Amino acid sequence: MAAGVGAIDWNAPWLAPWRDAGQPLAQRVAGGEAVHQALQAAPQAAVYFVPQTELPAGTAYEQFIFDTRRVPTRDNLHDFFNGLAWLHFPQAKQRLNALQAQAIAADGVQSVRGPLRDALTVFDENGALLQAPPALWDALRARDWRRLFVDLRPLWREARLTLFGHALLEKLVSPRKPMVAHVHSAPAAIDSVAELDAWLAQAVQPQAWAAKPFAPLPVLGVPGWWPANEAPGFYDDAQVFRPARPPEGAGDNMGTHIAR
């Protein structure tokens, strides 16, 4: 784990909202503390972080958190970033957890998640919130990548992308061009992570979220986030910047865009 947290580049632009709390905790882990111990030392902790061994065999992870307010935590980067998400978005994480627990109580743990649990998991692992002018959102929803990132590039100075998903944060420790977030729109007027957290906790409504109201966004295409995207032709890679599907194609398999 010391090597893992040591590989985190806290100067990466996507980690700006996470740096003040995350970097000191990473230093504690690098010094030999278990991940759950370092997280529990954070003054803003709204849940208890405990070793993974406290999760009883046969008990659903989300149900255990809901029942006990304890988050089983392994000594790896995935759970380190999950803990940081709990520290930064406590209200939203509790809302996602409560909806997961309600679905588990109603339907049990099945081999295939239902639409709502699937959407909640996708966002929890790989989500982000984008505050942006309408023109950027129109281009993103149309997957008009050249318009989004080239023609409208100056508009990105008025936009803010805040990552939420802990799996995405983990993957971005070793950035690769194909990494894509599942993005939800947030009001432009919100100007702090705490306000985003409170808004998101209210915005997660089961019926709407079961339809996965997310847009896929290759995060390293965001202006200022990756030096390579200044080069001509960066956005011509159709394996990453995929065109919109024809209208007759039913649905959008967002799962194909999960960061790998």
Image: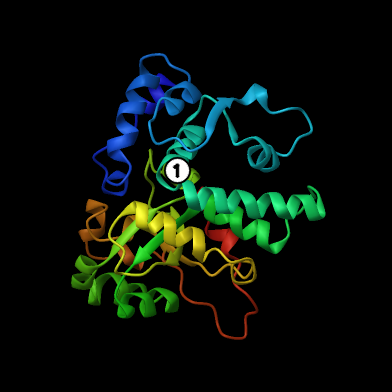
Relative to residue 110, is residue 185 drawn left or right?
Answer: left
Asked if 122 appears above or below 71 in the picture, the reply is below
Q: Which residue is denoted by mark 1 in the rendering?
A: 85
Q: Position of residue 217 (x, y in %)?
A: 42, 63
* Residue 216, image x, y percentages: 47, 65
Please identify the residue farthest to the top as the structure is shown. 32
Q: Outermost residue toward the bottom?
A: 248
Q: Can you tell which quarter of the image residue 237 is in?
A: bottom left
| Crowding at mark 1 (Cα within 10 Å: few <14, some 14-19, many 20+) | many
- Residue 172 drawn at (x, y percent): 39, 43
Q: Is residue 176 left or right of residue 106?
A: left
Under circle 1, the secondary element is helix
Q: Kindly identify the residue that appears in the image at 41 percent across and 26 percent down.
A: 4
At x 33%, y 59%, the residue is: 161
Q: Quadrant of the N terminus?
A: top left
Which corner quadrant of the image does residue 72 belong to?
A: top right
Q: Residue at x 73, y 60 (%)?
A: 114
Residue 184 seen = yes
Closer to the camera in the image, 178 or 222: 222
Image height of 237 relative to 176, above or below: below
Looking at the picture, how far across and down is residue 245, in whole percent?
A: 54, 78
Q: Is residue 138 left or right of residue 20?
A: right
Asked which quadrant contains residue 198, the reply is: bottom left
Q: How is the image coloured?
A: rainbow
Position of residue 17 relative to residue 115, above or below, is above
- Relative to 232, say whether 80 is above or below: above
Q: Amino acid at mark 1?
A: Ala
